[in-house]
Image (cartoon, rainbow, N blue to C red):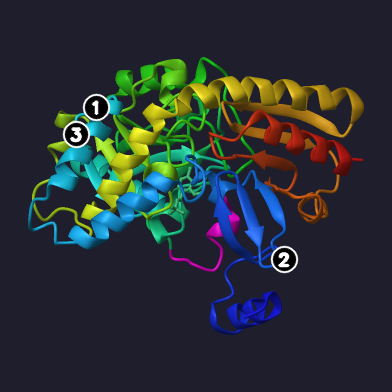
């Protein structure tokens, strides 16, 4: 099929839930994707913070081949070495003791909400305005953006939303029925919003005082994205539950929900399950992703190249008065502009760079963590060219 045929066939046969950009991607390597005509694009979208190790990493390709020949999937009724190995490694990377494997961020958050309710015997979850936690009925309800909920009522009960970065509002929302506070350490979908330094520590203190659980949704911020392995390490706050997905298995669907032994003990056999949760294939690829993180020092690269990138983006502020803010941690960055962003994505694409606009006015830049400085320079040059 040529590009037009691919677009037409997709539009004819796939439900119309995505506003797609006008690009057919044919293949991808490292931080570069290629269209059907062989044109190259530096990818700062990276599957929306999924391809942290870059596209088609040769080690991942090799592991997928080997594992596919050995065993792809058996039921969680049985034990596998792949799951045992990876569970130990992921838990050791986290501040937690136990993991539940899912297939996506939304499912990891669903599992966290179920665990919090089962552990506390309480129903209310407080989450944040402008948050994003997924597209299942429960996670759109936790998501503090009415546009994702409209038309899907009735929504599950027990959710309240308060302003992000506002401790007082959380305090006022807590009742004797509150089970947990669910929060992104940095809000992603609403435009890379970084809270004040004392916000998460104060949230931890408040949850401790009130005896409620603190859940960090690290689906987007996890796996080195913010220059730490988990973003919780930026402030040193240890949540009771962490959820993860996106970059965890290099693009193979996987999610995880991690908790302390004490909290995790509320789940008994039969309380929660997922057919595909923690397959041998996903776990062996996820283990390989951890190897790549270590060998290529990706957390360090994210931190150091993030500083380099933000310096260059900040320098653009001098030239473009439409830039209101440059913010982020590691290689999770946003450039907030006071300008019409509608043409930016297409203009950057014409110049060989894929970008994404979050919340209407923030250019969100979440490239692979092994992107080179030369590639980052090109991204900055293109942003310089397209901004008024
Ligand atoms: C913070 C956060 N939580 C949850 C999700 C949902 O993840 P998934 O699309 O894998 O269900 C996303 C996706 O963008 C996210 O950014």
Q: Nearer the viewer, residue 319 or 286?
A: 286
- First in sequence: mark 1 vs mark 2: 2
Q: Quadrant of the N terminus?
A: bottom right
Could you tell me which residue is drawn at 47 percent across and 28 percent down?
298
Q: Nearer the viewer, residue 310 or 25?
A: 25
Find the distance from the CA under tag 2 to the CA under tag 3. Answer: 42 Å
Circle 2 sits in a helix, a strand or a loop, which is it?
A: loop
Find the distance from the CA under tag 1 to the CA under tag 3. Answer: 6 Å
Could you tell me which residue is drawn at 43 percent across and 52 percent down?
251
Compared to residue 56, the image places residue 214 above or below, namely above
Could you tell me which residue is drawn at 67 percent across and 27 percent down?
327
Residue 22's tag is 2
Find the distance from the CA under tag 1 to the CA under tag 2. Answer: 42 Å
- State which region is magenta: 145-154
Q: Report which residue position mark 1 lands on.
A: 92
Please state if 228 lies on the left or on the right of 79 as rendered.
right
Q: Report which residue position mark 3 lands on.
A: 88
Residue 147: in magenta span: yes
Compared to residue 16, the image places residue 239 above or below, namely above
């Amino acid at each position: 099929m040529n590009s037009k045929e691919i677009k037409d066939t997709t539009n004819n046969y796939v439900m119309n839930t995505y506003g797609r950009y006008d690009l057919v991607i044919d293949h991808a390597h490292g931080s570069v994707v290629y269209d059907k005509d062989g044109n190259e694009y530096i990818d700062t979208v990276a599957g929306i913070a999924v391809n942290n190790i870059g596209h088609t990493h040769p080690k991942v390709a090799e592991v997928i081949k080997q594992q596919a020949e050995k065993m792809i999937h058996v039921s969680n009724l049985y034990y596998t070495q792949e799951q045992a190995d990876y569970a130990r490694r992921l838990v050791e990377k986290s501040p937690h003791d136990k993991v539940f494997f899912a297939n996506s961020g939304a499912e990891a958050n669903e599992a966290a909400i179920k665990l919090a309710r089962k552990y506390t015997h309480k129903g209310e979850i407080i989450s944040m305005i402008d948050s994003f936690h997924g597209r299942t009925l429960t996670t759109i309800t936790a998501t503090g953006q009415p546009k994702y909920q409209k038309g899907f009522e009735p929504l599950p009960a027990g959710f309240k939303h308060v302003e992000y970065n506002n401790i007082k509002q959380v305090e006022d929302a807590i009742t004797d029925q509150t089970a947990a506070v669910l929060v992104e350490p940095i809000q992603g979908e609403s435009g890379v919003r970084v809270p004040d330094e004392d916000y998460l520590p104060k949230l931890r203190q408040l949850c401790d005082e009130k005896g409620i659980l603190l859940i960090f949704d690290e689906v987007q911020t996890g796996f080195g994205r913010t220059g730490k392995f988990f973003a919780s390490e930026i402030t040193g706050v240890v949540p009771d539950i962490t959820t993860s997905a996106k970059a965890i298995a290099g693009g193979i669907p996987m999610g995880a929900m991690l908790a302390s032994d004490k909290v995790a003990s509320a789940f008994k056999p039969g309380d929660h399950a997922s057919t595909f949760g923690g397959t041998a294939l996903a776990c062996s690829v996820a283990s390989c992703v951890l190897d790549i993180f270590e060998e290529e020092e990706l957390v360090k690269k994210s931190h150091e190249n993030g500083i380099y990138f933000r310096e260059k983006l900040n320098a653009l502020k001098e030239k473009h008065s439409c830039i209101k803010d440059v913010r982020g941690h590691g290689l999770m960055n946003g450039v907030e502009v006071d300008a019409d962003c509608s043409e930016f994505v297409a203009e950057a694409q014409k110049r060989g760079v894929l970008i994404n606009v979050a919340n209407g006015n923030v250019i969100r830049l979440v490239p692979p963590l092994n992107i080179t400085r030369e590639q980052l320079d090109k991204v900055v040059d293109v942003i310089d060219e397209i901004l008024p």
